[in-house]
Image (spheres, grey):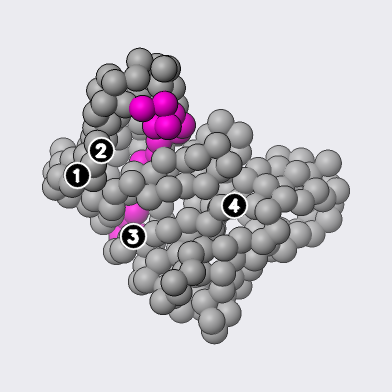
Amino acid sequence: ETGVTQSPTHLIKTRGQQVTLRCSSQSGHNTVSWYQQALGQGPQFIFQYYREEENGRGNFPPRFSGLQFPNYSSELNVNALELDDSALYLCASSFGQARDTEAFFGQGTRLTVV
Amino acid sequence: GIQVEQSPPDLILQEGANSTLRCNFSDSVNNLQWFHQNPWGQLINLFYIPSGTKQNGRLSATTVATERYSLLYISSSQTTDSGVYFCAVYTNAGKSTFGDGTTLTVKP
């Protein structure tokens, strides 16, 4: 059984660019949630995908978007990057919606916007 | 939205001491989890505990959902227990909220 894996582990982008982060859910899981964690803070919920549909969204602008694929892996896309988007991005997977079952996290992608 | 408050924000202990971390939340929740974030940023699951009490070795947790709080107990602390501890709550609306964490430092 494989755990949650994220790629890449680190990347550096320039303000205004677009970025795509990837998450492979744990075997048997059908839900992926994405979080942004700024330095010194707790993770902030971006959105959740359940069976390929967005199912819950936090207070993030529309330039944060996502996809979930038939194999339940997921992408987080951020357009028009801003300096404040620099953060650790975490994804979590669960079987069923995270409100009902235990969620497991990947190791994160550290994004730096310069 | 729901508010999650963790206390204390920082805790310094000598190895072997016991500690209690608290998580208060402002509304009803479906689910609550405790995590330990390692120095590399990964969140390690400690407890999935929407209600009741669970124990795992030196760690135990209690959630009293009706009174909107959860406690994480660490007994006989070790230096490897150092790090940031988060609680996260999950509501029926499909959203989750983390507290700001408790930073634990265990000194040898």
A68 left or right of B62?
A: right
Q: Name the secondary structure under disc 1.
A: strand
A112 left or right of B70?
A: right
Kindly indicate whether the residue at mark 2 contacts the one at mark 1 (C-beta within 8 angstroms): yes
Compared to residue B96, the image places residue B35 above or below, namely above
Chain letter of disc 1? B
Which residue is labeled 4 in the image?
A: A108
Residue B61 visible in the current orientation = no
Q: Name the secondary structure under disc 2.
A: strand
Compared to residue A55, the image places residue B99 above or below, namely above
Residue in the image at 58% along x and 42% along y: B40
Q: Name the secondary structure under disc 4.
A: loop
Q: CA distance from mark 4 to mark 3?
A: 18 Å
Residue A63 coordinates in the image, percent (x, y): 69, 59
The residue closer to the viewer here, B104 or A85, is B104
Which residue is labeled 1 in the image?
A: B55
Kindly indicate whether the residue at mark 2 contacts the one at mark 4 (C-beta within 8 angstroms): no
Q: Residue type at mark 1? A: Gln
Compared to residue B30, the image places residue B102 above or below, namely above
Front disc: 4 or 2? 2
Q: CA distance from mark 1 to mark 2?
A: 6 Å
Residue in the image at 67% along x and 47% along y: A110
Q: Kindly give the residue lying farthest to the bottom in the view shown.
A: A70
Q: CA distance from mark 1 to mark 3?
A: 16 Å
Q: Which residues are magenta?
A: B78-93
Kindly indicate whether the residue at mark 4 contacts the one at mark 1 (C-beta within 8 angstroms): no
